[in-house]
Image (spheres, rainbow, N blue to C red):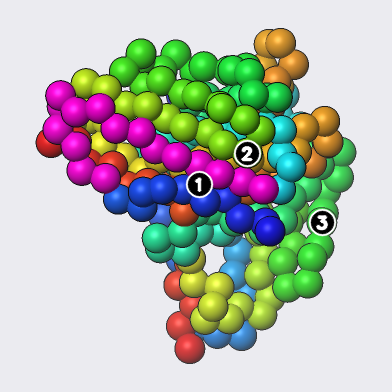
Amino acid sequence: DQQVKQNSPSLSVQEGRISILNCDYTNSMFDYFLWYKKYPAEGPTFLISISSIKDKNEDGRFTVFLNKSAKHLSLHIVPSQPGDSAVYFCAARGVLSGGYQKVTFGIGTKLQVIP
Amino acid sequence: DTEVTQTPKHLVMGMTNKKSLKCEQHMGHRAMYWYKQKAKKPPELMFVYSYEKLSINESVPSRFSPECPNSSLLNLHLHALQPEDSALYLCASSPLGGANEKLFFGSGTQLSVL
């Protein structure tokens, strides 16, 4: 049962344009959402996050939008740069019994920014 | 130092071998994690250590044995693995107690079981 879904395996965007990566989730108990970026042969690196009590968080060229009623979030990259080409993982944090936190990842979207 | 260092980067082992994966961080994080990632799949949580004690075991087979010798080190001991255990093994760490659960990942160990 995939609780975090990224339905687009890949996305190609021209340099300078907007990249929009989408993510859907099923568990309404998730309280925090994160985006990670992964280059080949490297581990995922944290990019941006949003609390479930907010609907937008912005950090430079990166903005994450959260629509709780639709259980949907998106990552906007404006303007897109060739160095943004990577796999982007959507992730969600939930609380397990015992109070421990668990981060669940989506399958990832491979973004290619074309110069 | 904001790095999580994993060794080795690549490992090939037979089904009867015993090997260990190592992970080290010097950020003072008190939570450390092992994740497993198969090709075209998301990373999946295996174990969580908090304050050097095993907090979460996500029903991982006993042929995987984690160890946390101190707050900076995390090992994963492997024994009698199966070919389907071939995957990228990622170590991560995070602070404890904060609302922002940022995981810092290592580059991973690409494991092949023959």
Q: Residue A98: in sight, yes or no?
A: yes
**Helix or strand or loop: what does disc 2 sit on?**
loop
Mark 3: amino acid: Asn
Rendered image quadrant of residue B111: top left
Residue A72, x across and y down, in percent = 66, 43
Q: Is residue A99 above or below residue A53?
A: above
Asked if badges 2 and 3 are on one and the same chain, I answer no
Residue, disc 1: A6
Asked if badges 2 and 1 are on one and the same chain, I answer no
Callout 1: residue from which chain? A
Q: Calculate the distance from the C-alpha at mark 2 to the C-alpha at mark 1.
A: 33 Å
Please name the residue shown 61% across and 55% down the image.
Answer: B3
| Picture quarter with the C terminus of chain B | top left
Q: Label 1: few (<14), some or many (≥20) within 10 Å?
A: many
Callout 2: residue from which chain? B
| Picture quarter with the N terminus of chain B | bottom right
| Magenta segment main secondary structure | strand
Residue B40, x across and y down, in percent = 34, 46
**Helix or strand or loop: what does disc 1 sit on?**
loop
Please name the residue shown 61% across and 85% down the image.
Answer: A16
Mark 1: amino acid: Gln
Residue, disc 2: B72
Rendered image quadrant of residue B81: top left
Residue A41, x across and y down, in percent = 40, 60
Residue that lies at the very extreme toward the front in this rendered image: B69
Residue, disc 3: A57
The one of A86 and B67 positioned closer to us in this rendering: B67
Please name the residue shown 53% across and 33% down the image.
Answer: B74
Q: What is the number of the mark on residue B61?
A: none
Mark 2: amino acid: Ser
Q: Label 3: few (<14), some or many (≥20) within 10 Å?
A: some
